[in-house]
């Protein structure tokens, strides 16, 4: 045997924790987290989400102390998703741009309490429509693109006026980024950022979310495949993202998360724009269910998933596991 065998031993840099920490290629911290939360109208309310064990919907007064504690521990941003009562759902989704609506009021209250906490608001009509779709539908149930965009711009402007830092169009309508950017510029909201759901796939992993915002019953058997992307496609994502960048998006999001990290890596290598990903409700529920049954270790599995997001190229991750991750990271100090 050659005396120098083996000349390179890869295990040398794995032999102790200190050296593993020194050579680690990917970092992950509380700065990479965005906490998606579901808000209810009224006061002193909290409701468990059956399809998302351990997660709840909250009225804003109940949510404030929860996010306040997380903010003190370093949380930079939250994403708001409203649960709208049936009486306020309509064909034209007019409640979406009500200046005194649930989201608009919540933004004002949270900003008053925590002015340095970033607030991201969802720009889409599914919580507000009778159909459960992300836009205005015709008599055949087809989502009308241009008519929807007009409502989305009103919704986005009302959120900006309320104080939202970032609006996040998740509707996948064509041309909505340009329309929203034009409205923001005309109304001097030059610094209100647009986080575009530029590559949102028609995924089967959204089920628990639709339960959480109470839109699944409205959808019935209809699908969102006429506007969300085909999960079999990859090059199409590049076109979608290029269009949104040119229309004025400040950052983009790829959704769902873990099963779509190949898309994240491809986009990261092609475009110089911040990329977020969404560890969606179905992904959360799968990990949580497996952990509750003792099939996997929850903490280790979730933290591994977060590193996978970062390794693929994500700048930040929206995850329902945010409170738990912050607790785990805090305990590791």
Image (cartoon, rainbow, N blue to C red):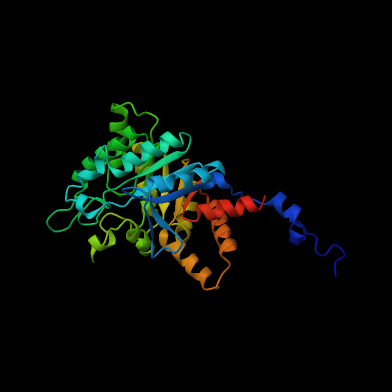
Tag count = 0
Looking at the image, the residue that sits furthest to the right is 3
Horizontal side of 74 relative to 260 (left or right) equals: right
Q: Which of these two is toward me, 176 or 267?
A: 176
Q: Which of these two is toward me, 189 or 172?
A: 189
Horizontal side of 94 relative to 232 (left or right) equals: left
Point out residue 284 in the picture as x, y percentages from the top left corner.
46, 61
Residue at left 75%, top 61%? 11
Point out residue 253 in the picture as x, y percentages from the top left corner.
42, 48
Tell me: residue 173, above or below residue 180: below
Point out residue 251 in the picture as x, y percentages from the top left corner.
43, 41
Tell me: residue 178, above or below residue 174: above
Q: Tell me if I can see residue 249 in this picture.
A: no
Residue at left 23%, top 50%? 135
Horizontal side of 221 relative to 56 (left or right) equals: left
Q: Quadrant of the N terminus?
A: bottom right
Point out residue 228 in the picture as x, y percentages from the top left corner.
31, 55
> In the figure, residue 156 lies in which quadrant?
top left
Q: Tell me if I can see residue 35 in this picture.
A: yes
Residue at left 17%, top 47%? 92
Looking at the image, the residue that sits furthest to the front is 44
């Amino acid at each position: 045997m050659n005396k120098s065998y083996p000349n390179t031993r890869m295990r040398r840099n794995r032999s102790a924790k200190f050296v593993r920490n020194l050579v680690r290629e990917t970092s992950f911290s509380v700065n990479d987290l965005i906490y998606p939360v579901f808000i209810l109208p009224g006061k002193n309310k909290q409701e468990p989400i059956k399809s998302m064990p351990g997660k709840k919907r909250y009225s804003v007064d109940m949510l404030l102390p929860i996010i306040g504690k997380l903010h003190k521990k370093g949380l930079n941003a939250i994403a708001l998703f409203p649960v709208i009562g049936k009486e306020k759902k309509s064909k034209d989704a007019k409640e979406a741009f009500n200046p005194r609506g649930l989201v608009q009021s919540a933004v004002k209250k949270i900003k008053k309490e925590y002015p340095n906490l970033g607030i991201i608001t969802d720009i889409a009509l599914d919580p507000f429509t009778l159909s459960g779709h992300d836009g205005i539908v015709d008599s055949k149930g087809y989502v009308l693109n241009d008519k929807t965009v007009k409502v989305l711009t009103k919704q986005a402007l009302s959120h900006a006026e309320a104080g939202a830092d970032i609006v996040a169009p998740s509707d996948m309508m064509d041309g909505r980024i340009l329309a929203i950017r034009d409205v923001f510029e005309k109304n001097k909201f030059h610094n209100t950022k647009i986080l575009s759901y530029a590559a949102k796939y028609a995924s089967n992993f959204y089920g628990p979310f639709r339960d959480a915002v109470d839109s699944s019953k409205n959808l019935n058997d209809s699908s969102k495949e006429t506007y969300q992307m085909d999960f079999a496609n990859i090059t199409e994502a590049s076109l979608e993202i290029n269009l949104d960048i040119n229309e004025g998006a400040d950052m983009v999001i790829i959704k769902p998360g873990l099963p779509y990290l190949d898309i994240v890596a491809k986009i990261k290598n092609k475009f110089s724009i911040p990329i977020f990903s969404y560890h969606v409700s179905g992904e959360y529920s799968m990990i949580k269910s497996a952990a509750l049954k003792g099939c996997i270790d929850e903490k280790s599995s979730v933290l591994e998933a977060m590193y996978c997001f970062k390794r693929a190229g994500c700048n930040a991750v929206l995850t329902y596991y945010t409170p738990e991750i912050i607790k785990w990271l805090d305990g590791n100090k």
